[in-house]
Amino acid sequence: MFKCSISRHSGWSTAVLAGVIAGTSATLAQVLLWLVFTDAFPAILFRDARLTAALVLGSSALPPPATFDTGIMLAATLVHFALSVVYAALLARLTSGLENVPALLAGAAFGIVLYFINLYGFTAVFPWFAQARGWITLIAHAVFGVTVTLVCRYPAAKSTQEVS
């Protein structure tokens, strides 16, 4: 059984690895689902990038137009991965004492709870996120949680990090 926790010894390297891989996996899952179940791609990706970039750039980043913009995409990517690393560190701590299957279930649950916090709770401060609600975004958040748990428990990660 592999367990994962972020300790002083491993620093943030495990959280960075898990956060980047999980953030990328969740985005890829979301894009795949958009491609299969909607006809809104890539406009929906550009819209969501603007919604995310507006967290740091302000409401001037919001659409329209929901088109590609290098600065918007860079800001959105930085915010996305910064939050992914923080959330990965939190999830690793929460699941460190669990067996593998319960940890994976907890990861999925964490992602789902994160969806509701981000897209319902934070809309009190950032109301523009309400338009990103939906089952595809919910699934992407669950993918994030499961992926963090898998990355933390992957044996190769153990050989490069001191994980307790």
Image (cartoon, rainbow, N blue to C red):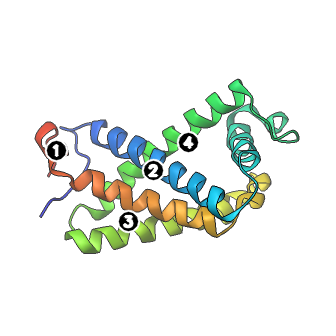
Front label number (4 vs 1)? 1
Among the two numbered marks 4 and 1 on one chain, the one whose residue lies closer to the N terminus: 4
Residue 36 position, x and y percent, is 63, 61
In the rendered structure, which amino acid carries the disc numbered 2?
Ser
Among the two numbered marks 3 and 1 on one chain, the one whose residue lies closer to the N terminus: 3
Residue placed at 16% from the left, 47% from the top? 163
Among the two numbered marks 1 and 2 on one chain, the one whose residue lies closer to the N terminus: 2
How far is the residue under mark 4 from the one under mark 3? 18 Å
Q: Quadrant of the N terminus?
A: bottom left
Front label number (2 vs 3)? 2
**Residue under numbered circle 3:** 107
Residue 21 position, x and y percent, is 39, 44
Q: Quadrant of residue 135?
A: bottom right
Among the two numbered marks 4 and 3 on one chain, the one whose residue lies closer to the N terminus: 4
Q: Nearer the viewer, residue 85 or 150?
A: 150
**Residue under numbered circle 4:** 80
Up-down: is 146 above or below 72?
A: below
Q: Is residue 4 left or right of residue 62?
A: left
Circle 4 packing at 10 Å, graded few (<14), some (14-19), many (20+), is some
How far is the residue under mark 2 from the one under mark 3? 14 Å
Residue 94 position, x and y percent, is 32, 62
Q: Is residue 63 left or right of residue 160?
A: right
In the rendered structure, which amino acid carries the disc numbered 3?
Gly
Circle 3 packing at 10 Å, graded few (<14), some (14-19), many (20+), is many
Residue placed at 84% from the left, 34% from the top? 60
In the rendered structure, which amino acid carries the disc numbered 4?
His
In the rendered structure, which amino acid carries the disc numbered 1?
Ala
Residue placed at 54% from the left, 66% from the top? 139
Q: Is residue 53 left or right of residue 103?
A: right
As helix, strand or loop, the secondary structure at mark 3 comes to helix
- The mark found on residue 156 in the picture is 1
- The mark found on residue 25 in the picture is 2
